[in-house]
Structure formats: C-alpha cells, structure tokens
Image (spheres, grey):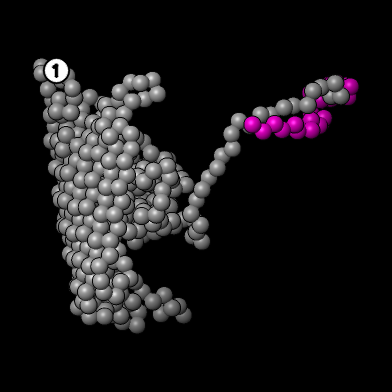
Amino acid sequence: MKKINPVLKPVALGIAAVMSSATFAEQEPLTIYITSNAVMTVPQTDTPLTVELDPKAPQQPIPASDGASFLKNVPGFSVVRKGGTDGDPVLRGLAGSRLPVLLDGMDFHGGCSSRMDPPTAYVFPESFDVVKVFKGPQTVAYGNGNSAGVVVFEHSMKALETGVSGDASVMLGSFGRKDAVADVQATGDQAYLKTALTHSESDNYKDGNGTEIHSKYERESATLIGGYRIDNDTNVELDYVVSRGEAAYADRSMDGSQFDRESYGAKLVKGNISPLVKNVTARIYHSYIDHVMDNYSLRADPDPNKFSVMKSTEKPMGLDSVPTLHWECLMP
Ligand SMILES: [Cu+2]
C-alpha cells in the first residue's frame, strides 16, 4: 500500500479568505491511500487504431475459448457475458450491429433473437491465424455500419515453400474445463490444404459462495480450406466450416440446446491486373445457423407443465469484391 503525503497549500479562494493563516498551519497533512496499482499490458503498435493480434500467442489469464474473451484483452473492449460459452464484445460502449465481426471475410451473425450467440460464439481464437481490430468508423473496406469498428478473424497460410506443419494446444481447468485445438497445413507446389479442429467444454462452476451456477457448455468445430495457385498472380480457395454447440444460461429461463453452423465459400485473388489495379479479391459465401433454445433439456428438474422451445435459423450470404490500387498512380 502506498502512502502519499501531498503538501497542502493555502488557496486564494473565498473560503480561504475568511480563514486565518494560523488555521492552515495547524492542519494535519492530507493523507491519500492508494490500495492497488493498475497495470496495463498492450501490444506494441505503430497504428493505434489498427490492432493486429496473433491468437496462437500465449494469452492471459488463460487461452480464450471464444472470440469475446479473446477481444477483452484489447484496450477499448469490454464484454457482456452470455453464459459460459461466450459474451457480447463491446468496443468503446458500442456493440451488436455497430461492431461487425467477420470470420474469414464472412459478415457473420448469430442465430438467436435473444442474442444468445453473438458472432464470437462461433470463434475458437487459437484455430485462426490472425485477428485484426479496426477501431472507429474510418475503414470502408468491410462494408458499412461499423460505427464502433470492425473485428476480423482470419485464416492465412504460413509462408511454407512445401511441406507439412501444424499446431496443437490443450488446456485443462477446474469445473471440468477442457479445451483442445489442432490444425495442420500441407503445402505442395501449387495446391495447399489446411484443417483445424476444436473442442471446448465446461461443467457448471461454483461461485465464491459455493453456489452452483447454471453455466455448462460444449462445442466443437471443424474447418477445411483448400487452395490452388493457377499462376503466380492467380489463386483460388474453397473453404468449409461446420460447428456444433450447446450452452446453459443462468441469466434467463432458456438454454441454448443447439447452435449448429455450416458455412462454405470461395475466394479468388488476381494480382497485377494493370498499372493502376494492384490486385482484386472476390469472395462469395453462404452460412446456415440452426439454433434451438428450450427450458428443459439442459436443466436438472424442469417443470413438465411449462416446457417451452423455440427454433430460429439464420442464412447470411454475401458476395464482395475488393480492388487494391497502386496509390502512386492516382497521385498527380
Ligand atoms: Cu436463443
């Protein structure tokens, strides 16, 4: 505990004017106690509004199993917790549609009308290769509506000539917490293949008072990406993602008994098109989220007279094309 004894100086205010100088001389010095120091750790960056993170790097306090927990460590972010499996990321007080989350270029939305599954619920951070956060509305490269910013989770191929490489990680914790992720990349002369598998689960945890909190969850995902280099300037890529999940929620009367996702897409990158156009990236994708929530399948003693179930689906699809120009060609 630090103890600070600032020098108390007479101030020429109206109150001070009616007090004699002897009054100040008799006062005890003001004592301020600071009970703890705030320690903030941030990645070093030259671009304060653009943060690029390596999700496979060591994380504090433990490796995150969902996108919101991962983003919580980025300055400016906070999280509205949504059950054990995920939360809603908030950037500078704004969330939801004001903070688009793109998964490999897919403008992604959850399937629940009650926001049980923000887009980050479908993210296992370590299975991605790079996470970019664009703070503020300045960028127009990721569509509109991003008044808070944009978050991008992406897979990328390692700069391997040819060969096979991979990463694997396991994390065990109290209350039955088990996380595992493995990804493998195989690269040939012209073709490459990448796959990532994830699993995350936890039982109900107990709070500091020993009360069991209805928060168990389980989810897994598989990602498959295949690409082919037609020539030095042309690359095509196909991707497929499938995931399953269920989660208990202590803050509401319903649980998410099914979070099923299936996504597929294609990407074409064409470079050196003209002296002005450096390259063009075209992306087409389709997602399907099948969500069921009920008040009995994940609860210990459900009342059979009050069973309730809701089903909702979400089918986001998109097509975008992004040219990159040689800026110097536009300069006079
Ligand atoms: Cu729901």
Q: Which amino acid lies under the numbered mark 1 shown in the image of this protein?
A: Asp
Residue displayed at 17% across by 44% down: 244
Q: Residue furthest left?
A: 305
Residue 70 rendering spot, x and y as whole percentages: 37, 46
Residue 188 rendering spot, x and y as whole percentages: 21, 74
In the rendered view, would you say 314 is above or below 56? above
Q: Quadrant of residue 138?
A: bottom left
Residue displayed at 43% across by 56% down: 51
Q: Is residue 102 visible?
A: no
Q: Secondary structure at mark 1?
A: loop
Residue 185 rendering spot, x and y as whole percentages: 24, 64
Residue to which mark 1 is pinned: 303
Residue displayed at 41% across by 51% down: 58
In the rendered view, would you say 63 is above or below 106? above
For the N terminus, give its image quadrant.
top right
**In the image, which residues are magenta?**
1-23
Does the segment drawn in magenta span residue 2? yes
Q: Quadrant of residue 178?
A: top left
Q: Quadrant of residue 190?
A: bottom left
Does the numbered disc 1 mark a residue whose Cβ is under 8 Å from ligand 1?
no
Q: Is residue 248 visible?
A: yes
Residue displayed at 30% across by 47% down: 170
Does the segment drawn in magenta span residue 327? no
Residue 21 rendering spot, x and y as whole percentages: 88, 24
- Horizontal placement of 195 versus 10: left or right? left
- Nearest to the observer: residue 231 or residue 311: 231
